[in-house]
Image (tube, rainbow, N blue to C red):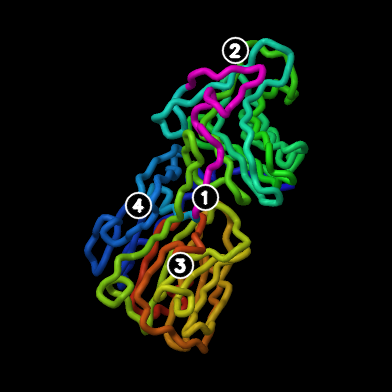
Amino acid sequence: MRIQTCRTSLAGAQRRAAVWWPNGASMAIEPTSNRAMVSGVTLPLSNLVSVNRNSIGTALRADGSLQKFQANQLRATDRGLLIEPTATNVILQSQSFGMAPWFDVAANIAAGGPGPDNTMNSNKLVENSTSSTHYVVQTVSLVAGTEYTSSFYVKAVGRERVQIRCNDGADWARCSFNLNTGLAETPTAGSAQITALANNWFRISVTGTPTIGTGSGIQLYLLDDVGNLSYLGDSVSAVEVWGAQLESGTFATSYIQTTATSTTRNADNISLIPSGNLPFAGFNPNVGTFVVEHVKDQTNTGFTRLFAINKGSGNDEITLYTFNGNISVLIAAGGVSQADMIGGSYAIGTIGRTAMGYASNDIAISTDGGGIVADPSANLPTGLTVANIGSLAGGTQLNGTIRALTYFPTRLSNSELQALSA
């Protein structure tokens, strides 16, 4: 069983000087400051970067508060540019726990204070005075054998312990959380995660796989001071609760609000604005260097991209990608891999930096100042017209943030690559 406690990672990560406009660069973006640069001219980020995401989205700021973004708006905050795949929240009335299909047991729902977005009010889950279990539940139908993650935003208001329990006749995900210490206990089913946010809010989640699917109860329990599930309530103690979410997958993605129906957040498909036949102004198809500063919010066992210079598919591309905890460079031409090298690894929630240089028969990569990994025999693809950020051709989204991306129209030396990635 996995427990992940992230008291600060999603609320800012460690600080690191961003890569921005070094001498010789022809293009740079810095989402943390909402700016871009082309040929020495500074522009708003949206003048150089476009997004196709036909749905509302949210993202966390560095202070741990939540920011809302309109459809087709870059989710750029002071943490970076958030890039995620499609996700659907199947919990209904995600912010209205007093409305059906929510059902409270030995508890009642009252008005709370400001939620994690500082604008919409939360609810209070208040225990009654009986000796019982005190909780709120919503029953949903899921696909048996599919992994799901259930999450809530919670804040202690007299009660400092809560439990998420997902049950379809047997517990398929269950864990208790301490909102005083900010820690998750050992899950009795599935895995769990807790993340500290602004103003004493936490996001808590459990992940597991239902065996039946139909009739799964998604339950949030109040616990007493020593963690008992059943106890004598006092009609006063409570937790504030906001933003319930249930989605397929191994971790909670950014918050998706629902009302009477489930809601889908579409994938972030982000690209640089092309210049003529080039993927962006100042691109050199023969030689070049990219430096990217990045944060992976979750571990993906699959293939995700930091950026991809291509012509609409992975058959011809110059790309940096992540796979199984590593960061690699891939050069493909005519559907044939020319170079594919691991340049280093990444830690969840930690700012990393990778530099990659390319020229014919001269590919090199360095991550976080580590040793150079090189390939002296690689043909470059031709006719590249698209520059995707955090994805390629509508897929392989990063599940993380891009903090900065800088491009040099020259192949910098290996020692320069190592220095720029440090």
What residue do we see at 53% from left, 76% from top? Answer: 372
Q: Is residue 405 magenta?
A: no
Would you place residue 410 above or below residue 168 in this image?
Answer: below
Instruction: Report the amino acid beneath label 3.
Output: Leu
264 lies left or right of 171: left
Marks 3 and 4 sit apart, C-alpha to C-alpha, by 17 Å
What crowding class fits label 1: few (fewer than 14 Cα within 10 Å), some (14-19), or many (20 or more)?
many
* Range drawn in magenta: 86-112
The disc at residue 392 is: 3
What residue do we see at 33% from left, 59% from top? Answer: 50
Residue 189, position as x, y percentages in the image: 75, 41
Instruction: Report the amino acid beneath label 2.
Output: Val
The residue labelled by disc 4 is 72
Please tell me which of labels 3 and 2 falls first in the chain. 2
Mark 2–mark 1 contact, CB under 8 Å?
Answer: no
Q: Does the magenta stretch include residue 110?
A: yes
The disc at residue 236 is: 2
Would you place residue 371 above or below residue 302 in this image?
Answer: below
Label 2 or label 1, whichever lies nearer to me, is 1
What residue do we see at 77% from left, 38% from top? Answer: 170
Label 2 or label 4, whichever lies nearer to me, is 4
The residue labelled by disc 1 is 87
The answer to whether residue 422 is visible is no
Residue 71, position as x, y percentages in the image: 36, 48
39 lies left or right of 387: left
The disc at residue 141 is: none
